Amino acid sequence: MLTIPKDKLIQAVKDMAIDANINLDQSVVKKLKAALKKETDRLPINVLENIISNQDIARNEHLPICQDTGIAVFLVEIGYELSFEYDLEAALTEGIRQAYIEGYLRKSVVDHPLKRKNTLDNTPPIIHMKLVVGDQLTLHFAPKGAGSENMSRLAMLTPGAGKQGVVDFVLETVRLAGGKPCPPIIIGVGIGGNFEKSALIAKEALFRPLEDQAEDPVDRELESELLEAVNNLDIGPMALGGKTTCLAVKVNSYPCHIASLPVACNIQCHAARKTHVTLKGEHND
Amino acid sequence: MIKLTTPISKSDRLSLKSGDEVLLSGIIYTARDAAHKKILDYLKSKQESPFEFDGQVVYYVGPTPAKPGYPIGSCGPTSSYRMDPFSVELMPRGLKIMIGKGDRSENFKDILKQTQSVYLVAIGGIGALLAKSVLKSEVIAYPELQSEAIHRLEVKDFPCIVAYDAYGNDVFHK
């Protein structure tokens, strides 16, 4: 039987959660530095310089990049050759609990949306699992802050609204958000599927590598059109004006009903923290 | 760059202009959603304020726990709009300077102008850098709120930008 030992999984989760909160991925840093070169006005230059300097301080002093260390989000890919004699969700939760307590991360989760009692260990995480071919377990992790998540929106457009409807909805979402989601942002767009599928593929879009492009040519074109249109809004870093409102747009699509055109727009702040780890199944005998 | 020390005098407050960069020193107080709700509940039930707001500065932040040897963890601003319904009650009662991030409601701006208050922003998502401007931090109220408790911060050259000045000028691009 192939499995991932429970202790190994918990340790991997703990390590990745602390690491993601402290070390901003170099692909994001590269985009921020490129953005700084394009800005000409005092305030956007000030903002981008501080953002770049902040991630250096965080890395060197082992401090969280942002005080909002998020609610933990996992996309889990489980190779179907693996089997587990323990509760996988409970193990992921335990890894998060240890990371947020021992890693000096903020506990930002309440037990019920209306009762609002802090759970004191940032659990539970939000976990999306899917089965894939193979004998490996891949964990994609992001500590998702509320500033940008709160500015995300979903609409059930009519098929007649078409591509322009999608573009208008995304631009409206970014305009309404203004400086609140901490621009320069990254935008994950999900089109198609149904109500919940569009939201999930928008979230998955934010987990894609920053430098990649959508495989589908229509989605790919939409990504570059939206990026240009959003950056022409003159919102700029922290909405203080400038050329860089958005670092990247990622579009994921899925087949949908003849009567539907769902669109979900998931916003990510410039502190775009995410990481992944792949664990290979081990013989358990 | 304008240097200001708290408590901030009326003339200093009125001299600020939207877009000015400010370095703030002295004592500031933290409060975000849950603490604002508690303050307002107190005001409504007791008909008096639990704090003296005159000349004081409220910063919308919930810091990460301090590592050993540090006065505070990461401590950047949270989005201010969520505090709008509370701020409009507090500005007429003397709270005139707030620090957060992002734009705010039209109602907030109206009351801000009427009360000649000032709204500053700190750059969001740079909590590790902003922590360098905090010399001391202690919880002074509502410890049960954890990171959302009211902290008294001693800051030195804490960097802010004037978003809305006392005349209602707005720095944001929309």
Image: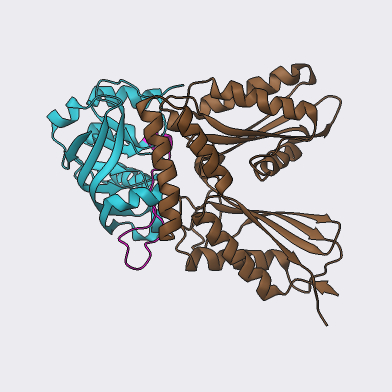
Chain colours: A brown, B cyan
Is A216 left, or right, of A236 in this rendering? Answer: right
In the image, residue B59 lies at what x, y percent?
31, 43
Q: Is residue A208 above or below residue A94?
A: above
In the image, residue B116 lies at what x, y percent?
22, 25
Is B8 left, or right, of A189 in this rendering? Answer: left
Q: Quick check: can you spot residue A147?
A: yes
In the image, residue B71 lies at what x, y percent?
30, 60
In the image, residue A215 lies at what x, y percent?
79, 35
Magenta residues, dominant SS class: loop
Is A96 left, or right, of A130 in this rendering? Answer: left
Q: Is residue A187 above or below residue A137?
A: above
Which image quadrant is residue A40 in?
top left
The residue located at (55%, 24%) in the rendering is A231
The residue located at (86%, 75%) in the rendering is A1
Q: What is the magenta range?
A: B62-85
Q: Is residue A65 above or below residue A261?
A: below
Question: Residue B49 or A91: which is nearer the viewer?
Answer: A91
The residue located at (13%, 35%) in the rendering is B9
